[in-house]
Amino acid sequence: MQYVDEFRDPDKAASLIAAINELIQKLAISRDKPLHIMEVCGGHTHAIFRYGISNMLPPEIEFVHGPGCPVCVLPMGRVDDCVAIAETPGVIFTTFGDAMRVPGSKKSLLQAKADGADIRMVYSPLDALALARDNPDREVVFFGLGFETTAPSTAFTVLQAEAEGLTNFSLFCNHITIIPTMRAILQSPELRIDGFLGPGHVSMVIGTKVYEFIAAHYKKPLVVAGFEPLDVLQSVWLVLKQIAEGRAEIENQYGRIVPPDGNKAALAAITRVFETRDFFEWRGLGSIEHSGVRMREAYVRFDAERKFAIPSLQVEDPKACECGEVLKGLIKPWQCKVFGTTCTPQTPLGALMVSSEGACAAYYQYGDLEGLRDRRAADAA
Amino acid sequence: MTKQEPLSTLRPQRKIRDGIHVAKVSLAHGGGGKAMRDLIDDVFVQAFDNPALAPLEDQARFALSDLARHGDRLAFTSDSFVVDPLEFPGGDIGKLAICGTVNDLAVGGAKPLYLSCSVIIEEGVDVAFLRKIAASMAKTAAAAGVAIVTGDTKVVTKGACDKLFINTAGIGIIRSGMDLGAHRAEPGDAVLVNGLLGDHGAAILAARGDLRLTTAIESDCAPLNGLIDALIEACPQVKFMRDATRGGLATVLNEIAEASGIGIEIEERKTPLREEVKGFCEILGLDPLYLANEGKIVAVVPGHLAEVARAAMAAHPLGRDSAIIGHVLQGPAGRVVMQTHFGGKRIVDMLVGEQLPRIC
């Protein structure tokens, strides 16, 4: 594949690994106290596992899998709300595919569909709009979720619905924002992170300048990274280089996609349709100030939260679940008591086991399970 | 690819009744009366025309002596086909229904001989469409050298099925001395495939139309008994074959690793994939190792015969891109690993449910 294979070149990978090893030697980092690099975005987690990047890197570098998988951080109560809307007579509920399996307190959307709710998988919010046009006697609800990557397309869809005068389309808005979330992680007193791989596609929308406080205030290097394996390796090398040179800066490895100021049209659409919520509930992380958006008053007629009587109950995560600790990088997925035992991709307890971008699912699917169990046993002993 | 000889117990061929004169199938065609007989005669019997089917008894009858000429054990399999859409680039539900059952017999080392064909039709389906599907089944059966010898037709009310479901069962005879099994893989064995993977899965996903992706990818749907004959002839020591249908290559490899208690390592670099399928998966966030195939087998052969087996398959039109993709290791038992082209290693696990496209 042209323009893709170039970013998966094994020879270039080998030279980057050599450069990384050189820096590790220079920094005299020991295996007992490895460097922790958080990849904020689930897309990076996926790439790291899919290409086997973790085990190409020296053991002195450990990835901490951040909160950037929107499906994973979706609280159970919100899934319950989705099910309640979907089970309302006359509703066609539309969602991205990987939200289908996220467990609610009683059932997932996949189970609700099996029970008879009209739930359809779409690939774009515009597909939901087309459904609304084709089914004027039905209410079509789109389940909007994701960071700033997906929020613009949802916003444009609402604007399009307004332009067409559609009255049977609404949005169940669960969009979240990255900056307050990173701030919350950085403020965590137990923070054990030495540098960040910044989210590539979110930054395509919001730009790179918004991260400045991370370098200025928290003195942590951040490199906005692409999603191909060479992107990831080069970004790791750039983070190490900053540490080795005693710098903490915001760098952009993904310059072919990410402009420093972001995408103005996309940002304008977000601002026009959405406003910040005071608080938004995150699975595993709890409530984070200003971390979510809702629809502005002007678009209330497209707001499913106001159109439907939804329960909006806060549902506690299962007690045994340690998703929050994993998300904050305090423990590795395999150090969670229920990992691979009662929590598996077949029967996920925690959200990190649900999406293929979730750290636990990625460890389970691509990781060395037996090795991890041995390590857990050794830790316990 | 010879057609089966007429069987000694058959009665003289019954005269075909009136044709069917309406455009759409209705519940009357499932009522057991004249309308149903007309539908069966006109659409299916005409298309499948063969001496064993013609008497329209409740069962097809075979002389054991005829069967025994091909081997010493009977293989019997059944498969149901509910594909959506019913027609797709490279095939249709009829072709699929024949290939699926023929291949399930052939991978067991059996020579496929006879198939049944049971259809469940939703009322309102066009008769002309049924004729087309029946013709496709007949053509595929002829190509595979099998006869459709018995069947059943049901018509259900609208909504009770999705237009057309087909079940085919098949009988084949296993060659004397063949003993294939997923449990027989041993360290040192080689793992082969007969060509480009994932075409069927990608073609079906694209044909559903809701992805708004236009691709030139066609289903690889094909009867593989000819290719398998060639493989067995060149390499009778073959230990195991399976067609990599739902769940794709990854699932079959995991089944072998588990049943044999061994590990398998494959190389991404050697695993044949069409550029279009790679691109298709890239856009949707799918893994081609899990995409369905309908014309691909995974074969395990002793390591020293790997090249012999590959060459035999590559000489067949359905095996041009055959490749030795990996080998069997002592352990870890039940583990399938892929050496990525990029230089890393990853575990290739069983899929939990369906592959769902990723959000971003």
Image: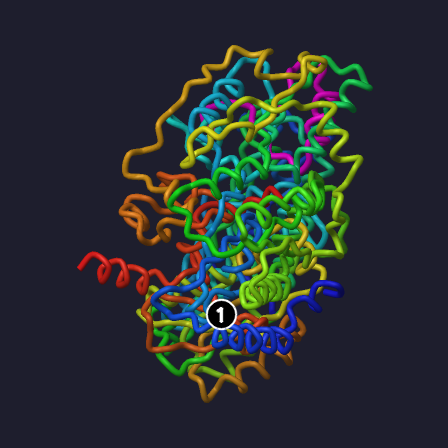
Q: In this orientation, which residue lies closer to the viewer: A103 or A216?
A: A216
| Residue at figure coordinates x 78%, y 24% from the top left | A160
Inspect the magenta stretch and tell me whether residue A166 lies in it: no
The amino acid on which the numbered mark 1 sits, given as a three-letter code, is: Leu
Q: Which residues are magenta?
A: A114-141
- Which residue does the numbered mark 1 point to in the structure image? A57
Vertical placement of residue A84 versus A8, above or below = above
User: Which color scheme does this rendered protein use?
Assistant: rainbow
Vertical placement of residue B358 versus A140, above or below = below
Q: In this orientation, which residue lies closer to the viewer: B293 or B103?
A: B293
| Residue at figure coordinates x 67%, y 39% from the top left | B130
Relative image position of residue A311 (x, y in whole percent): 45, 15
Q: In this orientation, which residue lies closer to the viewer: B230 or A41?
A: A41
Relative image position of residue A158 (x, y in whole percent): 73, 23
Location of residue B223 by image quarter = bottom right
Relative image position of residue B292 (x, y in whole percent): 56, 55
For label 1, the SS is: loop
Q: Quadrant of the C terminus of chain A?
A: bottom left
| Chain where mark 1 sits | A
Relative image position of residue A264 (x, y in whole percent): 79, 37
Location of residue B64 by image quarter = bottom left
